[in-house]
Every structure is written in C-alpha cells, then in structure tokens.
Image (cartoon, rainbow, N blue to C red):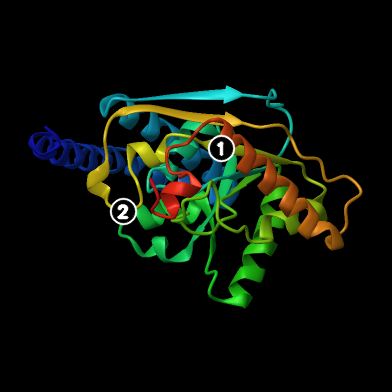
Amino acid sequence: MHVLLRPLQWLYCIYALLLFIGIMLLLFPFILIASLFGRITGGNMIYRLCTLWGDIWFFLIFIDHRNYYEQPLDKNKQYIFVANHISFLDAPILVKTVRRPVRALGKTEMANVPIFGFIYKYAVVRVDRSDADNRAKSVRNMRSILKKGISIIVFPEGTFNMTPNPLKEFYDGAFRVAIETQMPIKPILFLDAYDRMNYKSIFSFNPGKSRAVFLEEVAVEGLTQKDVPVLKQKVYSLMDKKLREYKVSWVKAPSMVNGQS
C-alpha cells in the first residue's frame, strides 16, 4: 500500500512546492515596496507578509497548525525564543507560531537563493557558523535588533538534529545575548515538523497536523557570562524533557538505537 501511495505523495510535494513559489512571486512586489522602509520598519512589514504567505500556504496544502501554551505569552514583552530544529519545514512553522516582530538567526548561504534570498536578508540575522568573526558579528546584530524592540528566535542546535535524541548540542550565542541584554528566554517546541517533512528528503512532505508549544519562560536576571553553561543546560534540559513527554516521533528508545528488539 505504501508503494502505491508514493506517486500521490510526489504529486503532493510538487503541488506544495509550486504553491510555495507562486505565493512568493505574488507577494514579492509588496515585499519590494516594504524593503524601501529600511531594515527595521521594512523588515517588520516583510515579516508580516511572510506570516500571510505561511497562512495561505498551510491552508492550501492541508496542514493544520495550532499553538499551545504551557505558560501564557506576554504580548508586550520581548523574548529570545529558542526552538528545536529537525525539518526543512521549521521556517514556515516559525511564521505560523511567532506572530509579532521577530528576526530569526539563519544560515548566510540561504541569502544567495534568487528572490527568496532577498526576502531572507530582511527576515533573518545571518550567520556563518564556520567563521568565528561572522559568528561574533551575528551576536552584535542580535543585540542591535533587540534594542529596536524586536524579539529574536534562534535554533540553538545550529543544524538539523539527525540523532535519535530529542536535541543535539546547543551553541552558546543565544544564551550569551540573553544574559548580556537581560532578555528572558522562551523555549518553543515544534512537535510535528519531522512527521510532516523530515530532513532526509523533501519528498517526505505530507499533510496533517502541526503543533508548536510555548514552554515556561526562563529568566536571566542577575546572571553573568560565567553562567552561560548553566543557563544553556537549564534550557536544554527543559526542552529535552518536554519533547520526551510529548513523545515526538524521532526520539528512539535505547533498544532501537542499539539494534535490539
């Protein structure tokens, strides 16, 4: 049965990709106009257009996204959001999840993609994690964005988690900036991104549910840079625990990892 359904899934993937590009092209003239207002005001306008893009696309490809809150989100408060990274679908899920002015920390090479790269430059703080100077520059840019009253979202794993564990190791950047700016951290879990489209192939894409869960806020008041490892571990442990509680599909039991029955 699975083999028989495979051509239908391929057609769905092509349909979803064409829609993604088509909606982008329809919105691009408005994005060009928004860009004239600069990196801050224009960037906020572009992010709102991206949320519209996500709303239309998810509706047309039959993905039902819902946000859940283990602790209420203060709409008048800035945060450094941190989320797990497991799928190519994480970016579209992001704009369905965070409905406020925000900038994501993203890979610099994506800015080279035609048309999409132009949008990307305004929607993210770019970073090349292979270059120490570039990483330092991205941290400075995050500080500047926060001073403008805009929240930041970071995938602290840096790249896709390809392990059987809930998370891979975190980078320090988001936690250093949180302590320096005394900005609280708000963890978010993307529970179904792997099931909708895993990192192995874009042709794994399929319709269904998408859930994002906002966890309890992690305060940083009084912490110094010496506390970065402790803060990072605290957030990691919280997210790891909750991903296990929600029984996300990519987490494998030890017996399965060892090849035992």
Disc 2 marks a residue whose amino acid type is Lys
Badge 2, how many Cα within 10 Å: few under 14, some, many 20+?
A: few
**Could you say whether the residue bearing mark 2 is in a helix, strand or loop?**
loop
Q: Which numbered disc, 1 or 2, marks the residue that appears first in the sequence?
A: 2
Which residue, given by chain and number where applicable, does mark 1 sit on? 243
Residue 189 in view, yes or no: yes
Q: Quadrant of residue 62?
A: top left
Disc 1 marks a residue whose amino acid type is Leu
Q: Nearer the viewer, residue 256 or 175?
A: 256
Q: In the image, what residue occupies the spot 68% across and 55% down?
A: 174
Q: In the image, what residue occupies the spot 39% across and 33% down?
A: 54
Q: Quadrant of residue 75?
A: top right
Badge 1, how many Cα within 10 Å: few under 14, some, many 20+?
A: many
Q: In the image, what residue occupies the spot 43% across and 43% down?
A: 250
Asked whether, in this view, residue 191 is left or right of residue 180, the answer is left
Residue 17 image offset from top left, x and y in percent? 23, 43
Residue 139 image offset from top left, x and y in percent? 67, 62
Q: Nearer the viewer, residue 51 or 68?
A: 68
Q: Quadrant of the N terminus?
A: top left
Q: Nearer the viewer, residue 31 or 142?
A: 142
Residue 191 against residue 255 in the figure, above or below: above
Residue 15 against residue 60 in the figure, above or below: below
Q: Are marks 1 and 2 in contact (CB under 8 Å)?
A: no
Residue 36 in view, yes or no: no
Q: In the image, what residue occupies the spot 75% across and 47% down?
A: 234
Residue 118 image offset from top left, x and y in percent? 40, 56
Which residue, given by chain and number where applicable, does mark 2 sit on? 200
**Could you say whether the residue bearing mark 1 is in a helix, strand or loop?**
helix
